[in-house]
Amino acid sequence: MLGKLIKYDLKSSAKLFILLHAAFLLVCGAGRLFYMDRLDFHAPAETLVAPISIISALGIFLVSAITLCTSLLIMFRFYRNLFSREGYLSWTLPVSGIEHLWAKIISGYLLSVIDVMVIFAGILILVTGRNVTEAYRLIAPEMTEVLGMSLGTFALYIFISSLIGCISSVLMIYFSICVGQLFPGHRVLCAIAVYFITSFVVQIITFVIMTVFGLFDFYSTGTRAVADDILNMLIPNTVFALILAVIQYAAAHYIMKKKINLI
């Protein structure tokens, strides 16, 4: 039954999800064809600042938009399927609340992972043109020295960390919605408030922990590579996110098992 629930969730989200991400890849392809491939990296550096800044700003906007849309899609499916009018039908199925939760976790995680993969694919489309790769080849030794590793290896670390972080992002959404159901009214607004409050508290705790352990001391030595500084933040952040995910799962598990009330 769990497999059927996962299949149903993915099928219900597929059309909009595929449409959004196909549009993202098309925009990235168009950006490379009509913009990136036309940049002359042999031109004076000052003439490249504006076009690179523009494409970087647009890229950040697109990535943020597609990530937000995926999160909203995951949130919408979880809330609508379990806590709206549709939820009355869902809870009549011969399925426990925990099976419902795990189905949503697995389907949400799969959507998030595909989202990350598509985003990285779009970035690769933008930056793998011949003019870009030839220009990077000229500065690759300096970049490797600054990072302390090749750019490809560094990107791989970021990619893996993003995939691991997907589970925390999904559980943060589900945890917030479950807690929102404990309020007698305005449950959607309460769930949104819980999400932002939890995110803020997590950032504060992360900042305190990293400060206590000296992980913000970037400039303690002039010989340490930039990648070392970033990984020193990335690794504990990822570990903390996984610990938080376990706590949020336990809370969502308890609420769905003991506190469900669709009235």
Image (spheres, rainbow, N blue to C red):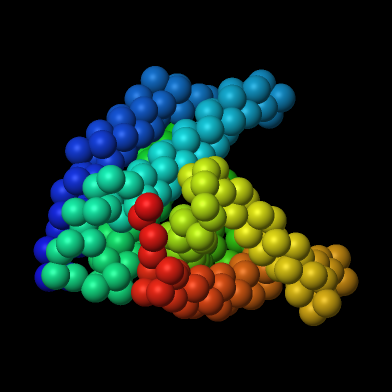
Residue 85 x, y percent position in the rendering = 28, 45
* 145 or 123, nearer to the observer: 123
Circle count: 0
What quarter of the picture does the N terminus occupy? bottom left
Outermost right residue:
220
Q: Is residue 224 above or below residue 178?
A: below
Judged left or right of residue 37, residue 151 is right
Residue at 48%, 45% (x, y): give it: 188
Q: Residue at x 15, y 58 (%)?
A: 7
Location of residue 26 with respect to 92 vertically, above or below: above
User: Horizontal and vertical percent for residue 42?
Assistant: 58, 29
**Residue closer to the observer: 263 or 96:** 263
> Is residue 50 shown above or below 144?
above
User: Is residue 162 visible to the viewer in this orientation of the structure?
Assistant: no
Residue pictured at 24% horizontal, 53% vertical? 88
In this rendering, position of residue 241 left or right of residue 124:
right
The front one of 130 and 113 is 113
Between 169 and 159, the one nearer to me in the picture = 169
Please give the name of the residue rendered at 87% of the width and 71% of the height, measured from the top-left corner: 220
Q: Quadrant of residue 35?
A: top left
- Residue 144 percent coordinates (x, y): 61, 61
Q: Is residue 200 left or right of residue 20?
A: right
Estimate the x, y position of residue 22 in percent, counting from the top left: 27, 35
Residue 116 visible (yes or no): yes
